[in-house]
């Protein structure tokens, strides 16, 4: 779905990312690479296909939009270096021409040498891409328009017979966009849907719709 924010055309993708045509950039958040490997190291049998599926969606976004840059608004990684990061490193070689920019989140704890090996540019906690400031955690007040992630936003749809359905969503506010978590291996937070000034763009399978 195409929207206009700050006089910029942005394309919301049901693959949980934004494409910004003028900058030829994909913007996403909360990939949590290494999360499945971290859980497996603790004896919890999470299948490795979770990571493969996430990267397959990212490949599809790249094939669709041909971005020159991918900007990750924090929590690209989940914990320390593990075998999942090696898997990502191999995938990364397929897209050497694309710049990766990481605005660090609370989970991004790799060493600088690891980011360099993965060809990832690490920024300060706030990264200015006119007219937007990219930051990991949403803030209530800002002098600039913010794009963030962190909360893994969702929306609860109420149906008949007291049935409910929770879907990931983009939250568009007066001064910010909150991105859905890119990884499918995350929970959903629905507290923000009580704010009347927000718009909610829900993701249902391969479709985006506004409520």
Image: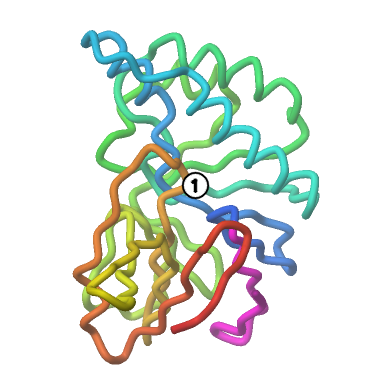
Residue at 50%, 81% (x, y): give it.
Answer: 210
Measured as percent of width and height from the top left, residue 44 is found at 25, 15
What residue is disc 1 on? 72
Predominant SS of the magenta segment: strand
* Quarter assignment of residue 39: top left
* Residue in front for this viewpoint, 165 or 38: 165
Measured as percent of width and height from the top left, residue 179 is found at 43, 61
- Tell me if 6 is positioned left or right of 147 in this view: right
- Describe the element under mark 1 as helix, strand or loop: strand
Residue at 70%, 63% (x, y): give it.
Answer: 23
Task: Give the answer, above or below, for where 151 lies relative to 41.
Answer: below
Q: Which residues are magenta?
A: 1-14
* Residue in front for this viewpoint, 131 or 7: 7
* Residue in front for this viewpoint, 53 or 113: 53
Q: Is residue 145 magenta?
A: no
- Tell me if 195 is positioned left or right of 128 in this view: left
Q: Is residue 8 magenta?
A: yes
């Amino acid at each position: 779905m195409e929207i206009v924010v700050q006089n910029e055309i942005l394309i919301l993708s049901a693959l949980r990312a934004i494409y910004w045509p003028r900058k030829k950039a994909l913007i996403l958040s909360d990939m949590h690479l290494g999360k499945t490997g971290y859980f497996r190291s603790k004896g919890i049998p999470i299948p490795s296909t979770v990571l493969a599926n996430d990267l397959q969606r990212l490949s599809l976004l790249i094939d669709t939009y041909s971005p020159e840059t991918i900007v990750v608004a924090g929590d690209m990684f989940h914990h320390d270096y593990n075998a999942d990061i090696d898997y990502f490193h191999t995938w990364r070689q397929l897209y050497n021409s694309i710049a990766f920019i990481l605005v660090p989140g609370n989970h991004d704890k790799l060493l600088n040498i690891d980011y360099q090996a993965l060809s990832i540019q690490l920024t300060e906690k706030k990264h200015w891409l006119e007219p937007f400031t990219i930051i990991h955690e949403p803030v209530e007040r800002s002098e600039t328009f913010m794009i963030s992630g962190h909360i893994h936003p969702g929306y609860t749809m109420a149906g008949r017979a007291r049935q409910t359905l929770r879907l990931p969503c983009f939250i568009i506010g007066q001064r910010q966009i909150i991105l859905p978590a890119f990884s499918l291996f995350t929970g959903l937070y629905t507290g923000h849907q009580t704010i009347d000034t927000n718009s909610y763009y829900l993701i249902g399978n391969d479709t985006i719709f506004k409520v």
